[in-house]
Amino acid sequence: MAKTTSLRCRVLEGKDLPAKDVSGSSDPYCVVKVDNEVVARTATVWKSLNPFWGEEITLLLPRGFNNLTIYVLDEDTIGQDDVIGKVSLSHQQISAEPRGIDSWLSLAPVNPDQEVQGEIHLELRVPERGHPRVLRCHLIEARDLAPRDPSGTSDPFGRVSCCGHTLETAVMKKTRFPRWDEVLEFELPEGELGEAVLSVEVWDWDIVGKNDFLGRVEFFLDTLCPGPTRGWFQLLPFPSTTEDHRGQLGALRLTVRLLEDTVLPLHHYQPLIQLLTEPILCPAQSPEGTALAVLEEVTSGESRQDVATKLVKIFLGQGLAVPLLDYLTTRELARTTDPNTLFRSNSLASKCMEQFMKVVGLPYLHEVLKPVVNRIFEEKKYVELDPSKMELSWGRRISFKGSLSQAQVRESSLELLKGYLGDIVDAIVGSADQCPLPMRVAFKQLRRRVEERFPLAQHEEVRYFSISGFLFLRFFAPAVLTPKLFGLWEQHAEPCTGRTLLLLAKALQTIGNLGLQLGQGKEPWMAPLNAVLLPSVTRVRAFLDALVTVVDEVPVPLGHSQPSATIKEGPLHTCPEGRVALLPRFAFKKRHFRLSTQALAHAKVPQGQVLGSIPVEQIRAVEQVDKGTFQHPHVLQVLAQDSTGQLHTTYLQCKLCHQTVTPAPQPWCPPLPPPSSSSSPAPAVPWGVSLSLVSPQSAPELWQWLWALRRATSANRDMLPTCHPGAFRAGRWTCCLQPTRAVPGCSRTHGAVALGEWSEPGDPAVAAQSLYGHLR
């Protein structure tokens, strides 16, 4: 039995943000953190004080959480990004709203004394009646403290205050994981303690200047039970004493909903799975009143999307995904009288087919579209057909002779679009043999059911449109429009590239509609593309005929799961734990890594022979390595457990790469409040108090790999609760300075994962519990 916690956070929009650029505007984006762990970053909205993001993030939190914080920052091309403000919500605030929070929340300033992290391990002994009035506070250790020094560490010491007396521990040099093991004693006054408080603070000692605050925890003595109280306690900031800035920094509109559930072992859900599969395995049974029919009736909107995702993953595991789609589409066809409205709504049949294509067809989608999408991102050409949106100054990027006329921009854009669209259509119509067999069988069954329902010659187009409506309108076109969501590109599209993708997606939608609405749209400026669209429709019909020409209709084998899709690949420098003692120059070797849903493999070159691999199911932790552990920064570690139970650590270093990626956030170092005016220079900021969410390009690449590996391992069992964020070198761990290699990890591992709706491996027990919740 396990408790699962998931958090659905939708970052919708901001308003009245302060201007941080000299142009009088800002380039805002948001960073989402759960308990000081960065879990997601939104796109940047350029030149806007009222940005709209509309991004939804589903977070899987294996161990629960205490706080959710969304920071709003202004992206700068040169120098550090400016912090605009933040919104913080505690677990108690979110759980108090069962239906979720949906409101505008004012941004609060970011105060360095409030940006703390880490935990402290304490044992408190309160004297019992009749014993000497001595309170003993045992400071054992602390972990994951904020780095405040240039070395990426701190020099922490403890300061304990009680009843007007203050005592301090020794200073532990150059570590974020101090172990004091000191007992501080306080003599308590006679009589009632009243509101007496024991305050435990952690500070970073500095030889020059004032010490830096690292966090605190308080205990009211009258609430402590006699005898020992021992445990790990989260460090908290000082109570806020800043003035009310409501409205001065703008506001953020969020929707946040907490879902907590208890998941039983899988065998407890077998009766439910049998109920769900019964109408598939026993088709003679009346379809009314079945579990599938009830699910279709009680769900709508967002809940139907969730139900479809869970159903597809469960039925894939049972080898019955294709029969499920046949059952649902047959039911919808029976209810449809007008073929022009077929599968137009977001019915359970439509949603399940959509999720099925995304789960099963992701490698196929990458093979077909990725070469063209990559070229569009790399070329960054200006494309525009709408006269009202043309920016003639962009002509200088097309021609060095100066700005072009509107006709010249339109002609250049038309040629580019024809080239891109032609390559996309060529790739699609030539891919029938590459399409996964389950998809082809599902489409063949769909066409047969449509022909049975609408047999008249006047409805001949329906047999094509029933397939193209799914394949083009719900698969190819959305992937071209939002390639990041489908894993075709790692970054959000810039406005120029995004416009090109939007125009191509519109063209693919027209092709998916088989050209039936050509000339009837509200965008007459798209008409010049008709010369390409009409021949493409004819080729697509032939492609659909070839797609459903399947001889082998063997059902998907039992236990079929998501194919081995590439999640991320690129160059990394690797070092096994056995070579840590060597100089980094010789210890790390450059290799090309490929992470799939099955394994993390590496070779010397992108298409070379695999030299080694780590099965995803054997990975037990993926963590960032502390700065200063190696001579080069941006190192992560992968801990895997072999068949004998032995743990092995592989260190991966991210260096600058040629591919441009969206800057991703680094671990938080609390900033000073931003200057009140964008024209005034920023004050000098001491090390460890500055914020750098955008750094050299290898840092974003590090976070891309961390998130990708954590997503791939999100369903793994037996993940490690702790690990060492340093390396064992010269007879001790560089992080906690312990001299024993086998000592338990000094840092908690990070388990928060931002999941996609369909691109992540799924736990069938979790999916079944979710469906049970919808049926209750």
Image (spheres, rainbow, N blue to C red):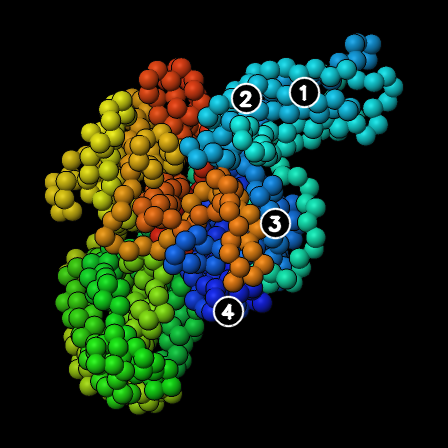
Badge nearest the viewer, 4 or 3:
4
Q: Quadrant of residue 516?
A: bottom left
Are the residues tagged 3 and 2 within 8 Å (C-beta)?
no
Q: Considering only order in the chain, which callout, 2 or 4, is on the residue closer to the N terminus?
A: 4
Distance in Å between CA atoms under marks 4 and 2: 47 Å
Image coords of residue 682 (percent x, y): 51, 53
Distance in Å between CA atoms under marks 1 and 2: 13 Å
Q: Which residue is mark 3?
A: 89
Distance in Å between CA atoms under marks 3 and 1: 34 Å
The crowding category of the residue bearing disc 4, from other C-alpha atoms within 10 Å (few below 14, some 14 to 19, many at least 20), is: few
Secondary structure of the residue carrying numbered label 3: strand
Q: Amino acid at mark 2?
A: Val
Q: Is residue 36 left or right of residue 655?
A: right
Label placed on residue 167: 1
Q: Amino acid at mark 3?
A: Leu
Q: Considering only order in the chain, which callout, 1 or 4, is on the residue closer to the N terminus?
A: 4
Badge nearest the viewer, 3 or 1:
1
Distance in Å between CA atoms under marks 4 and 3: 30 Å
The crowding category of the residue bearing disc 3, from other C-alpha atoms within 10 Å (few below 14, some 14 to 19, many at least 20), is: some
Image coords of residue 122 (percent x, y): 61, 22
Q: Considering only order in the chain, which callout, 3 or 4, is on the residue closer to the N terminus?
A: 4
Are the residues tagged 3 and 1 within 8 Å (C-beta)?
no
Q: Amino acid at mark 1?
A: Leu
Are the residues tagged 4 and 1 within 8 Å (C-beta)?
no
Q: Is residue 30 left or right of residue 193?
A: left
Q: Which residue is mark 2?
A: 171
Residue at image location 17% in from the left, 67% down from the top:
427
Image coords of residue 749 (percent x, y): 44, 33
Q: Which residue is mark 4?
A: 24
Secondary structure of the residue carrying numbered label 1: strand
Determine the residue located farthest toward the right in the rendered image.
191
